[in-house]
C-alpha cells in the first residue's frame, strides 16, 4: 500500500472505528480509497462501476470490522472484499460498457506471452472473457499477482486459478491477430 500511512496507522483507525469513531473510519477510507480504486478500475475500467464496488466494499468492511484482529493491517482484508465484489459484479453481468476514456494517452504497451498490446485494446479484449477468466487474467498477467494470492482473493483453489489463466491465454492466442 502506498502513501504515508503505515499498516500500524491503519490498524489504529480500525481500533478507533470499532469504538464508534466515525472520523477514524473516514480516515481509513481516505487512506485506502486510491489504491483500491486503481485495483478495481484495472479489472472493471468503468468509473461508475468502480465507485459502486468501492462503496459496497467499504460498507461490507464496516459491517465486518470486528473480524480484523487488533494490530492487523486492514488493507489485505479490504482488497479481498473489493476483488470478490468485482467478481460478483462481473459474474452477474451487471456492468457498464468498458469506458477507457479516463486512461491517459501514450501508455506503455504490455508484454503478454511475448507479444506487445496496447492497454486499451487489451482491456477491451479482456471484456469478452467469462468473468472468472477475465479477473484471473487481469490479476495474474496484467497486475502480476501470484496464483495463490489470486485464489485467496477470489475464494477459489489455486488449481482453478491456473485453469482460468490457461483458458484466457488460449483465448488470447486465438484472438491475438485481431486485437493487435
Image (cartoon, grey):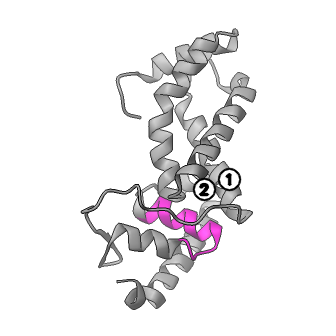
Q: CA distance from mark 2 to mark 1?
A: 6 Å
Residues at badges 2 and 1 in contact (C-beta under 8 Å)? yes
Query: At 50% across and 58% down in the image, what residue appears?
Result: 45
- The quarter of the rendered structure image containing the C terminus is bottom left
- List x then y, in percent, for residue 172: 46, 82
| Picture quadrant of residue 144 | bottom left
Kindly report the secondary structure that dominates the magenta region of the rendered protein.
Answer: helix
Please tell me whether mark 2 sits on a helix, a strand or a loop. helix
- List x then y, in percent, for residue 74: 56, 28
In reply to whether residue 139 is colored magenta, the answer given is yes
The numbered disc on residue 155 is 1
Out of 119 and 176, give the one closest to the viewer. Answer: 119
Residue range in magenta is 127-141
Disc 2 crowd, CA 10 A, few/some/many (<14, 14-19, 20+)? some
| Picture quadrant of residue 133 | bottom right
Q: Is residue 103 left or right of residue 11?
A: left
- The quarter of the rendered structure image containing the N terminus is top left
- List x then y, in percent, for residue 166: 53, 77
Residue corresponding to mark 2: 151
Query: At 41% across and 89% down in the image, what residue appears?
Result: 178
Amino acid at each position: 500500500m502506498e502513501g504515508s500511512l503505515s499498516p500500524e496507522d491503519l490498524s489504529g483507525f480500525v481500533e478507533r472505528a470499532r469504538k464508534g469513531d466515525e472520523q477514524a473510519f473516514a480516515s481509513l477510507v481516505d487512506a485506502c480509497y486510491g489504491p483500491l480504486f486503481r485495483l478495481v478500475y484495472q479489472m472493471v475500467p468503468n468509473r461508475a462501476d468502480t465507485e459502486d464496488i468501492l462503496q459496497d466494499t467499504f460498507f461490507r468492511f464496516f459491517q465486518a470490522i470486528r473480524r480484523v484482529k487488533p494490530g492487523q493491517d486492514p488493507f489485505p482484508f479490504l482488497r479481498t472484499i473489493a476483488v470478490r465484489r468485482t467478481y460478483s459484479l462481473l459474474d452477474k453481468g451487471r456492468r457498464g460498457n468498458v469506458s477507457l476514456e479516463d486512461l491517459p494517452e501514450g501508455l506503455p504497451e504490455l508484454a503478454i506471452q511475448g507479444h506487445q498490446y496496447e492497454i486499451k485494446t487489451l482491456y477491451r479484449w479482456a471484456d469478452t472473457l467469462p468473468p472468472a477468466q477475465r479477473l484471473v487474467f487481469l490479476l495474474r498477467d496484467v497486475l502480476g499477482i501470484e496464483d495463490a494470492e489470486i485464489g485467496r482473493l477470489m475464494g477459489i483453489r489455486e488449481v482453478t486459478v491456473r485453469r482460468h489463466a490457461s483458458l484466457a491465454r488460449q483465448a488470447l492466442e486465438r484472438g491475438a491477430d485481431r486485437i493487435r
